């Protein structure tokens, strides 16, 4: 028995030494061929502590942040895909580069070492085979030790190559290798190399589509899974504000659905010049009523009334077959009707504010709020302001409908609890949209918004949240609730809202700081090519 | 003698597999950075178990709507040994009905990496929200499939590890 225990102990201790070297473990001394080089730093950056919960988190720079490192033929050990899944194979990024970003986590947060965010670039090559600009494979993560190990290996490779150069200078060697990597000819080799370079690293998930949320004026976030989005995927192009010039509803140039105008929407789609020539195209209650009923007919064709839950996808997708301005008009009318309902009749400001939140969220998702504000500040004439809006919106990708149908945001569109869309626009009733259309027509004529509550710093163009007083989302803050009233050019005094409570620039850490709430809008129902 | 050594080795390997397939809340932490992104960190194991080396650090970016997120639980995926869902709070939305979204950062213990971020539950208060299709995590034919609203979000093959009963 004692012998057996002794043998067990011997086996145990042997295992400690004989266990296979883990190539993924940078702390294993057997993996560290060379000590990491000491990078020049002017001073040791103090390690930042993780911010307290109530503080707004800042970007945390580490000693290696900002470094640009050429990859050469190295493999990057320990690369982590921030979206999950396997990292790209080395063949995708070799001869590319790494740009080291901020820290994802500090050593105190991980309990061991820092984690860096890196952007990985792969070389692109044109048909001549010459390396041109690099393209981004997306953002990834590396621990500090792995990053330093990579740096160390790269330095060794560079040194080895240089030494080899010296050794081989003046020597002609017979090299027996296949420069085409096994391909039968140069053409097929280049085609394969080009295809490999262009291949997406992480194919997009079918349900989670393109998400974009950027700061105003910033670059668009990469397509889900890495790479950059082609703006031609959406109906981009200069916009023209429909009717009132407020930019609430926009016609788009190069609209792929431009030839699908809904019968009854001629007035909505008319230009200012066409309206001048033909007064029947005036934007008024009757014409808008005809338009929204025409849209209802289109989206509900072949669907029972009221629709069943299983019709939701079909009906919502059909909305995106409309021209852009009809999509936005439908979103505006349906949302006011479903969210404000009879409150809009009792107090026009209730309907107007639902439209304002919808519009603000769209501009926020497109990252153009600052530029639009600049248009408002520079131009008091509506036509000039509209032209300014059009330039700003040229590359925007979300419209009112994308925002309205964004999952869970506006309860009326829910597939389950809270969703009353089937009783609302899924069900044709005479005069059902009168109040919503009145809110739409009144939208332009608001001369002044008066905001009461909050911290006193609310900006009407950055009110993104509202809820009914009866519910308590995690972001409910009684001391930040806003009530909106105002003055209208024809309606006179607009009473304060009370069917909903509104918030300025909300759902940020701690108090609303005005720094910028940002929403990523998903294209759940818009068909992407 | 040789048989005893081999048997000891086999027992150690088998038991190490059982002990290794574990993930606890203590190893996990959500951090928020200035780019408005939340990240889930899986720390290294605090202790070395038998001859298992400390597991490496892992990180995944989370899909959080709103100002805050927190860990909810760690769920083993039934019949998919080595797969864990790190369930986290991803935000609350709505105007008349407030819905809470719980999401899953799927961790693959055998591959030592996160496989992605997927919807887990749509809740009203603390219960599954009525009338909403919930995500489905299904294991069949050695494949873990994550489906939502009839669409396949992810399919992962796995080799079942030896599991202690």
Image (cartoon, coloured by chain):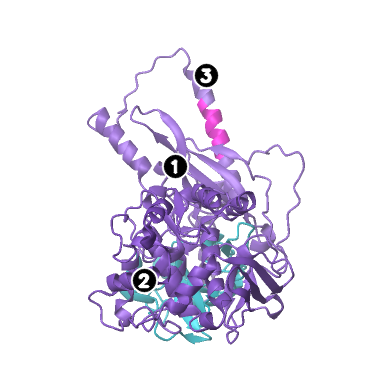
Chain colours: A purple, B cyan
Mark 1 or mark 2: which is in front? 2
Q: How far is mark 1 from mark 3, CA to CA?
A: 28 Å
- In the rendered structure, the answer to whether residue A117 lies left or right of residue A393 reads right
The image quadrant that residue B43 belongs to is bottom right
Residue under pointer 1: A93
Callout 1 secondary element: helix
Mark 2 or mark 3: which is in front? 2
- Read off the chain for label 2: A
Residue occupying the point 55% across, 63% down? A360
Mark 3: give few (<14), some (14-19) or many (20+) Cα within 10 Å: few
Mark 1 or mark 3: which is in front? 1
Compare marks 2 and 3 and give the one earlier in the sequence. 3
Q: Are marks 2 and 3 on the same chain?
A: yes
Callout 2 secondary element: helix
Whether residue B108 is visible to the viewer of this picture, yes or no, is no
Q: Which mark is residue A292?
A: 2
Residue A319 spot, x, y in % from top left = 34, 67
Q: Are marks 1 and 3 on the same chain?
A: yes
Examine the rendered structure and indicate whether residue B35 appears above or below residue A329. above
- In the rendered structure, the answer to whether residue A196 lies left or right of residue A218 reads left
Residue occupying the point 76% across, 51% down? A46
Residue occupying the point 66% across, 63% down? A109
Q: Which residues are magenta?
A: A153-161
Compare marks 1 and 2 and give the one earlier in the sequence. 1
Q: How far is mark 1 from mark 2, CA to CA?
A: 52 Å
Residue B2 spot, x, y in % from top left = 40, 65
């Amino acid at each position: 028995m004692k012998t057996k225990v002794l043998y067990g102990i011997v086996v145990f201790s042997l295992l400690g030494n004989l266990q296979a070297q883990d190539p993924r473990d940078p702390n294993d001394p057997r993996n560290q061929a060379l000590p990491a080089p000491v990078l020049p730093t002017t001073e040791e950056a103090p390690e930042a502590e993780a911010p307290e919960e109530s503080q707004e988190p800042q970007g945390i720079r580490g000693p290696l942040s900002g470094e640009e490192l050429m990859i050469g033929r190295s493999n990057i050990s320990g690369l982590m895909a921030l979206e999950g899944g396997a990292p790209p194979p080395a063949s995708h990024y070799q001869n590319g580069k790494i740009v080291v970003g901020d820290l994802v986590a500090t050593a105190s947060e991980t309990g061991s070492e820092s984690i860096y965010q890196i952007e990985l670039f792969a070389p692109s090559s044109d048909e001549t085979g010459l390396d041109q600009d690099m393209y981004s494979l997306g953002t990834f993560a590396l621990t500090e030790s792995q990053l330093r190990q990579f740096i160390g290996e790269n330095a060794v490779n560079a040194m080895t190559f240089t030494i080899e150069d010296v050794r081989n200078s003046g020597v002609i060697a017979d090299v027996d290798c296949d420069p085409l990597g096994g391909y039968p000819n140069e053409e097929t080799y280049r085609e394969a190399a080009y295809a490999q370079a262009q291949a997406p690293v992480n194919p997009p998930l079918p349900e989670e589509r393109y998400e974009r949320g950027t700061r105003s004026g910033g670059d668009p976030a990469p397509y889900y899974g890495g790479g950059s989005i082609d703006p031609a995927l959406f109906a981009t192009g200069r916009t023209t504000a429909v009717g009132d010039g407020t930019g609430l509803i926009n016609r788009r140039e190069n609209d792929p659905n431009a030839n699908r105008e809904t019968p009854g929407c001629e007035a909505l789609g008319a230009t200012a010049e066409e309206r001048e020539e033909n007064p029947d195209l005036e934007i008024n209650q009757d014409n808008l009523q005809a338009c929204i009923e025409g849209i209802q007919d289109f989206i509900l064709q072949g669907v029972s009334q009221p629709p069943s839950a299983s019709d939701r996808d079909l009906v919502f997708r059909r909305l995106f077959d409309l021209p852009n301005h009809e999509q936005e008009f439908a979103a505006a009318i349906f949302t006011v009707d479903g969210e404000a309902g009879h409150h809009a009749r009792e107090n026009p400001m209730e309907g107007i504010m639902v439209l304002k939140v919808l519009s603000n969220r769209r501009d926020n998702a497109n990252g153009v709020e600052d530029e639009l504000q600049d248009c408002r500040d520079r131009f008091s004439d509506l036509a000039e302001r509209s032209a300014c809006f059009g330039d700003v919106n040229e590359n925007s990708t979300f419209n009112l409908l994308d925002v309205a149908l964004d999952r869970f945001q506006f309860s009326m569109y829910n597939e389950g609890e809270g969703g009353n869309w089937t009783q609302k626009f899924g069900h044709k009733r005479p005069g059902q949209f009168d109040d919503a259309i009145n809110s739409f027509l009144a939208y332009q004529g608001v001369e002044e918004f008066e905001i009461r509550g909050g911290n006193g710093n609310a900006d009407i163009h950055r009110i993104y949240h509202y809820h009914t007083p009866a519910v308590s989302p995690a972001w409910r803050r009684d001391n930040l609730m806003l009530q909106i009233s105002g003055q209208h050019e024809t309606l006179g005094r607009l009473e304060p809202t009370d069917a909903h409570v509104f918030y300025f620039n909300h759902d940020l850490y701690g108090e609303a700081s005005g720094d910028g709430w940002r929403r990523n809008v998903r294209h759940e129902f818009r068909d992407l090519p | 003698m040789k048989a005893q050594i081999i048997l000891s080795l086999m027992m150690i390997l088998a038991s190490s597999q059982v002990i290794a397939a574990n993930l606890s809340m203590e190893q996990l932490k959500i951090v928020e950075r200035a780019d408005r992104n939340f990240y889930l960190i899986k720390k290294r194991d605090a202790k070395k178990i038998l001859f298992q080396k400390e597991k490496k650090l892992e990180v995944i970016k989370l899909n959080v709507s709103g100002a805050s997120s927190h860990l909810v639980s760690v769920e083993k995926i039934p019949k998919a040994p080595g797969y864990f869902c790190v369930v986290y709070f991803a935000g609350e939305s709505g105007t008349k009905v407030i819905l809470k979204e719980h999401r899953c950062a799927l961790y693959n213990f055998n591959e030592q990496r996160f496989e992605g971020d997927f919807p887990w539950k749509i809740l009203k208060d603390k219960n599954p929200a009525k009338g909403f299709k919930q995500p489905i995590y299904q294991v069949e034919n050695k494949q873990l499939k994550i489906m939502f609203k009839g669409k396949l979000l992810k399919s992962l093959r796995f080799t079942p590890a030896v599991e202690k009963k």
